[in-house]
Amino acid sequence: MNEEWNVDQGTLVNAWQEQLPEYLNPGDSTIVQADLADPYGLRIHINAEGRQDYSFDFQCSYLDRREVKVELVDVEREGLTVNEQSEQVQNLTEDYVRHIHECAQALHRITNPS
């Protein structure tokens, strides 16, 4: 990132931890942590609500003060890694990536204040 960054990672993690649940499905839970390898990055763990017992791990990195890049790291079901190519997992992943981008837009008040 070439732009000046005025938000410390701890503030960013707290803001995401507070805001992201508002964009997830009712019953989903999340844990947001700092990505220790990337000062502009977050690790997002989402436990999907429902009987399928899926959990998703994403890496979210700020490309600049407005845009994030979201990558799926792992999907588990009942603690075991699953095929990320199944239609159900692909649909859930797309939904969560969209929700993460929506949360990033809402947090522009912190990352890109006017």
Image: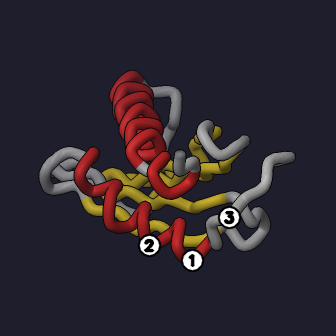
Residue 86, percent across and down?
44, 27
In terms of depth relative to the viewer, which is nearer, 45 or 4? 4
Residue at the spot of label 1: 10
**Residue at screen point 32% across, 58% down:** 19
Q: Amino acid at mark 2?
A: Asn
- Frontmost residue, 39 versus 88: 39
Residue occupied by mark 2: 14
Inspect the image, locate mark 1, and give the three-letter code of the amino acid beneath it.
Answer: Gly
Q: Are marks 1 and 3 in contact (CB under 8 Å)?
A: no
Q: Report which quarter residue 34 is drawn in.
A: bottom right
| Image marks 1 and 2: residues in contact by CB distance under 8 Å | yes
Q: Would you name the residue on which mark 3 appears?
A: 6
Q: Secondary structure at mark 2?
A: helix
Residue found at the very far top of the displayed protein: 87
Taking 55 as reference, is 108 left or right? right
- The single residue placed furthest to the front in the displayed view is 114
| Tag 2 near tag 3, CB within 8 Å | no
User: Residue sitting at 52 percent across and 73 percent down?
Assistant: 11
